[in-house]
């Protein structure tokens, strides 16, 4: 893969399998509704003997680096955010995935939390602001903790005092529909076993979705642009 042509030897050092096969397995797992064992069967049809635990380790090892390298091509999102949370099962218990998108549906940021409260909402907003700068409008649902987190940040000058804060079911339809992509992909996984692995996996699911929604600007070589688009299944 051209994205790693400069340091492919060191990046995939001591790997028993070819780097292209590793990238392909990771991409298929994150893009399609496949389990690790489904990928084992697919690879077996191609005369490649690989264990499902090996593919799992590839995802946990390489996904953070993929996300880090591709994030440099992200362009700014809009200043009108829709913020909401949805439910995901982690360790047999429900966790809360905070997500934000702009008015065009471009992903702003996400945060997986064990709790749904003011502290979690505030932590998510602070993280989103650090990555994406301050928004001009925020649309929330009717959950009081989210409104309290915004008010607290305004008092601490983390958000401007003249920030427009709205509650609108119609406007929040954008993010409600946006949740489907993540939940449809997570459903065949039958839940996560730990928060660290869940965060890594969801991060690259979001990355693939950003690529499909053209949430990255391709100011790079033609070969790298092709690789980015192929990973995200844009072409």
Image: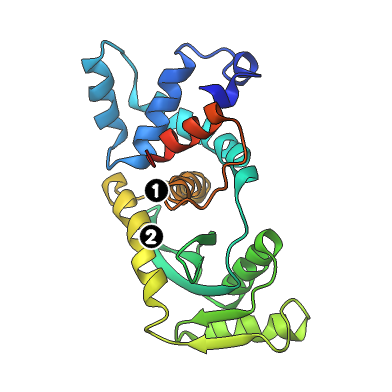
Q: Residue at x 47, y 84 (%)?
A: 143
Few, some or many C-alpha atoms within 10 Å of disc 1 (few <14, some 14-19, many ≥20)?
A: some
Q: Is residue 27 left or right of residue 126?
A: left
Label disc, if present, on residue 229 of the rendered structure: none
Image quadrant assignment for residue 118: bottom right
What residue is disc 2 on?
88
Which one is in front, 10 or 51?
Answer: 10
Q: Residue at x 29, y 54 (%)?
A: 184
Q: Position of residue 50 (x, y in %)?
A: 34, 18
Mark 2 or mark 1: whose residue is earlier in sequence? 2
The image shows residue 21, relative to residue 217, as above or below, that is: above
Image quadrant assignment for residue 24: top left
Few, some or many C-alpha atoms within 10 Å of disc 2 (few <14, some 14-19, many ≥20)?
A: many
Q: Residue at x 28, y 24 (%)?
A: 40
Q: Is residue 198 left or right of residue 123?
A: left
Q: Residue at x 48, y 18 (%)?
A: 19
Q: How are the residues colored?
A: rainbow
Which one is in front, 229 or 164?
Answer: 229
What residue is disc 1 on?
192
> Could you give the CA–CA distance between mark 2 and mark 1, rounded to whole angstroms?
9 Å
Q: Is residue 218 left or right of residue 104?
A: right
Question: Quarter of the image containing the C terminus?
Answer: top left
Q: Position of residue 26 (x, y in %)?
A: 42, 31
The image shows residue 120, relative to residue 41, as above or below, that is: below
The image shows residue 108, relative to residue 49, as above or below, that is: below
Which structural element holds mark 2? strand
Residue contact between numbered discs 2 and 1, judged by CB atoms under 8 Å:
yes
Which structural element holds mark 1? loop
Q: Position of residue 101 (x, y in %)?
A: 50, 66
């Amino acid at each position: 893969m051209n994205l790693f042509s400069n340091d492919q030897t060191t990046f995939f050092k001591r790997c028993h399998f070819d780097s292209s096969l590793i990238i392909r397995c990771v991409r298929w797992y994150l893009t399609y509704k496949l389990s690790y064992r489904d990928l084992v069967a697919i690879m077996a049809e191609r005369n490649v003997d690989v264990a499902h635990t090996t593919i799992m380790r590839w995802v946990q090892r390489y996904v953070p680096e993929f996300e880090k390298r591709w994030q440099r091509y992200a362009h700014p999102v809009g200043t009108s955010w829709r913020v909401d949370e949805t439910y995901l099962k982690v360790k047999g218990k429900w966790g809360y995935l905070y997500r934000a998108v702009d008015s065009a549906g471009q992903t702003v940021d996400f945060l997986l939390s064990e709790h749904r409260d003011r502290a979690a909402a505030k932590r998510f907003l602070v993280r989103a602001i650090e990555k994406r700068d301050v928004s001009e409008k925020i649309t929330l649902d009717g959950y009081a903790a989210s409104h309290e987190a915004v008010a607290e940040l305004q008092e601490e000058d983390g958000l401007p005092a003249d920030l427009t804060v709205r509650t609108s079911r119609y406007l929040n339809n954008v993010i409600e529909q946006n949740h489907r992509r993540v939940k449809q992909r997570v459903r065949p996984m039958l839940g996560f076993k730990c928060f660290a692995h869940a965060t890594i996996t969801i991060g690259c699911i979001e990355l693939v979705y950003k690529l499909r929604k053209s949430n990255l600007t391709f100011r790079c070589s033609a070969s790298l642009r092709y690789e980015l688009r192929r990973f995200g299944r844009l072409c």
